[in-house]
Structures are given as C-alpha cells and as structure tokens.
Image (cartoon, coloured by chain):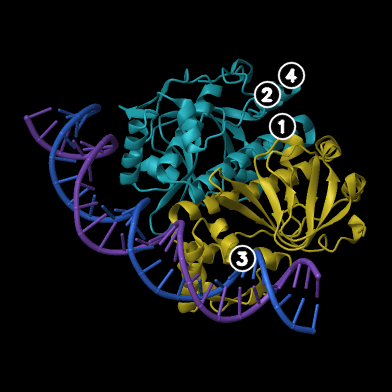
Chain colours: A yellow, B cyan, C blue, D purple
Amino acid sequence: MFVDCRDCPLRSLPLFRTFSDAEADFIRAIKIGHQAIAARRDLIREGDDHLSVYTLFSGWAFRYMMLDSGCRQILDILLPGDLVGLQSPLTGRVRRSVRTATAAVVCRLDGDALRALFQEHPSLSEALVTTLLYEEQRADTRLLLLGRQRPTERLGYFLLELRDRLLGREMTSGEAFDLPLSYEQLADAIGVSRSQVGASLGELRRRGWAELRGGRVGFADCDGMAAGCGYVRTPEQEVRTLI
Amino acid sequence: MFVDCRDCPLRSLPLFRTFSDAEADFIRAIKIGHQAIAARRDLIREGDDHLSVYTLFSGWAFRYMMLDSGCRQILDILLPGDLVGLQSPLTGRVRRSVRTATAAVVCRLDGDALRALFQEHPSLSEALVTTLLYEEQRADTRLLLLGRQRPTERLGYFLLELRDRLLGREMTSGEAFDLPLSYEQLADAIGVSRSQVGASLGELRRRGWAELRGGRVGFADCDGMAAGCGYVRTPEQEVRTLI
DNA sequence: CGGCTTCTTGATCAAGGTCAACCTTTGTGG
DNA sequence: CCACAAAGGTTGACCTTGATCAAGAAGCCG
C-alpha cells in the first residue's frame, strides 16, 4: 500500500494545518512508505537507537515506560496523525517504548532527511514547535491529573480527552466510540490499579455520565461529566501539523 | 541592570549550546531587558494572553496548575537558563502559571519578534525542537513517577534530578545544595501530602541517602539512592539551547 | 469445527498506604 | 519579646492495592 501524501485522508481534516505545495513535496520526498503492524507489538523499544520517524496512519498505539519492578506507565495514547519517535534522530537514544493497541498502519519517514526541514521550511518548523508546545500542554494536564485527582476523575478526564481528540479526527460522532484498551491498559494510563478502574467505571455509570460496555464507551452527560471531572476542553484545532 | 548576551555568564556553561555570531546578534536584538522579581510572585498567570517570553537568568521558579478545589500541582521546577512562557506567543492563551520560589531575575524577550527565529535561524530552531523534546522526556519521567512510584521514591528522584540539573549549571558541587522550597511546595511537586513529605524525608535519612536540614539538602549516598529510587541519569549536556 | 488455553471482566476482601487535621517545636523578622 | 510561618510528628478515617476467584470472550491448534 502506498498513499500519496496529497491524497492522505488525514490531511483533509480541519484539525491539521494545510501545507504549501513545497512542504507537501518535501514530506513526500522523505516518506519511505507505509508499514502495517499487528496489534500489541512494540513499534519502538526502550533504548532503540534507530533513525526512523513515523506518523500513525490508522489504528491506536501508546507510548509507555517500564520500571524495573515491572510496573508500566502509559504516557500518552497515540491516534492517527500523531508523530511517533521524533526524539530518536534529534536527541539520540530514548528511554520509552511505543506499542500498538490495535492493528495499525504507520507512515515511515527518513529521520535523518527530516532534519533538513529546519533549513528548508521555516514555517513548518514553527508549526512543529507549536505542535510540540501543544503536546506539552497536554502532558502538563496529565501531570495535574496524576498528581492531584481521584481515580474516577482521572478516568473521566481521560475518556473526555480521548473523545475530543477523536472528534477532531472525525472518528466519533461524540456519543460513543470503540475503546480498544483493556482494564489493565486503562489502569496503566491513569496510574491506578485494575480493580480501581472497575470501581471508577462503576462510579461513572452510577452518576449517569458514561458507560463502557463491550469495548465501547457511551457518553450520556458530557457536560456534567466534564464539570465533575474538572475537564476543560483545549481546542486542538488549527494547532497540529501533520508530518 | 543590563547584561549583554555575549557576556551572559550562563552562556559559557558547557550545558548550553554555543551560538553563532548571527544567532547571538538576533537574540540580543529581541531582548527587551532584565527584570527583577520578588520571591513568591506570579510571573505568568493562568489565562494570561501576553506576548512576552522570558529566560530565567537567576533564582528558582516553578510552573504550576490549579484545580477548582484549590489543589495545586507543580509541573516543573525552573532553573537559570530555562525558557519561560514560549507557549503564549505560539499557541495563544495558556492554562498554567509560573511563580518564583526565590527572588529572581528574568531576561525578557519580544515574543512576536521571536517568531522570526524560524525564518532566519534554522539551526537555532532545530536546537529549540531538540530542547523541547528533551523537556518532553523529563515530563514523561515525571509522569512515570507520579503514576507508578511510592512517595519516598518520588521525592528521592525529584531531588536527584534537581541535583543533576544544578550540576549542569555549576550551582552545586554535588554533595549538597540549598533547596528554596517549602514542604508544601515539595508536596505539590511530587503529588503527595505535606505530611507524606515529612515521612519520606525521614525515610531518605533513615536509609542514609540524603538529608534536608535548614533548607539545604545533603547527599550521603547518591548511587544507592539512585538505585533505590529508580533514577537514571539523563545527560542534559549539549542538548539545551539558551535563548 | 470442537476443544483447549489464555486473556479479560467484574466482584470481593483484608492489609496496608495516604490524607486532613491537629499539635508542638523551631526559626525569623519586626 | 511577640507574632507569624514553617518544620516535623501524631492520629483516626478513609482510600487503594493486590490477591483471589468465577464467568465469559477470544484466540489457537489439531
């Protein structure tokens, strides 16, 4: 499978910045090709030193870190359009891994050639910095969540944030979406135990906010849930650049 | 007080990337001037929409977020050389605040003019992206810490990371340093309660790793402490750019 | 296709961890 | 000398965890 960047269905989403022809040509030139990956496979392993950069084209994945004790912390959920592994070519070895949650397709880019972006496409590098700053904002919010929120609020926030990100990618209407994550993965993402995930899901249901059944989350009262979980929508639109 | 960027004592630290003459001229041109700030003052307040960007010149500060409940989470400690508030001019309004811990001096830059950096200094924008990716790595580690570590390890990790960052700035010999943070601020930084900070400090002392007395941390066994707290030194050298 | 294994969900429970509140001590500056 | 802030410790109440188990779903293999 080879999808020309011009025809990339992600690119037409209003979520992503529009490219100039020169920028599109550049990205197409450093694109190596698409690559299909099965579910639950590591795309990048801690300590890897390779130079590839990927864009998630379809499917779900997540970045994570492990402790020696075997504990895992999921740092972020990756959705289509997200850039994966930019660290390697720029900062060298990285201490985190990336794993698919579902079967996925990635668009593989030549990491070394990507560095020419800064020399040749200033607007694109500004957009990249803006995207990174936006990611930083999301990371800060996750930090607040893990440091100062109760399990139920963490889970509620997590689900609401996912919903908004999926809305931007037109992957949900907003009422419900398929959540391809197990209890254990949810637990590792919000920093609680598996049993706590069960209890928190029960509480979300009891309050009439949301429900997880058969791998699908349904939202009954987003506004109430957002208020109860301290969720504030951060507009993602027109901020992200798709490389 | 006005310090010419060429004479900036921070710039000569091996921690920071060396600048070309053209880059130094550019930074000097967008520098508005130094500004002294008292301890415990907000430099940036949540929701502010101003266009200034700062570099912390001397003193300690921290980024933080508040919840409606009044809970605070300290997101990161800012040390001399750190860039503050880059988000505002690029992404617009931000949801976090920056407060000084000690009396501090900041170097104020024209945020709008800073955007010309991408057009005019490609190497500098690559260095900036690398610095942001390095910050992301630190944020990921804090996430792991908050999600999956016990209070004592969180505190130990926090202190070891601070020590390494101060070493890079030649602000400590490595044996001890002044820590201008209250118990409450430590608690807000590592996501535990004040009483837990006391208990954790006691445990660090009991294990013969480190001790906090009179606002000064002393390290007795860094290697043992690093092993016990899961700390892995991430070399900060030659990664950071000082704008 | 059927039977086997493995994984996931969802619950319960005791053990242990954490918090907010309170108090005393220490140190600082007026 | 006093007022005030922070350090440092204690307590009971509450929350979270890890273990365990049973039922169901999903995947694998002959």
Residues tagged 1 and 2 counted as in contact (Cβ below 8 A) = yes
When the figure is inspected, residue B86 is found, relative to residue A182, above or below; the finding is: above
Residue highlighted by disc 3: A182
C-alpha distance separating marks 3 and 4: 54 Å
Q: Label 3 is found on which chain of the structure?
A: A
Q: Label 1 is found on which chain of the structure?
A: B
Closer mark to the observer between disc 4 and disc 2: 2
Q: Residue at x 70, y 38 (%)?
A: B129
Mark sitting on residue B21 = 4
Q: Residue at x 55, y 76 (%)?
A: A211
Answer with left or right where residue A242 lies relative to residue A133: right
Residues tagged 1 and 3 counted as in contact (Cβ below 8 A) = no
Location of residue D27 (image quadrant): bottom right
Q: Residue at x 75, y 62 (%)?
A: A59
Q: Residues within 10 Å of mark 3 (few under 14, many from 20)?
A: few
Mark sitting on residue A105 = none
C-alpha distance separating marks 1 and 3: 39 Å
Residue B94 shows in the view: no
Answer with left or right where residue B219 lies relative to residue B2: left
Answer with left or right where residue B238 lies relative to residue A188: right
Residue highlighted by disc 2: B17
Return the residue nearer the eye: B135 or B109.
B135
Identify residue type, mark 1. Answer: Ala
Q: Label 2 is found on which chain of the structure?
A: B
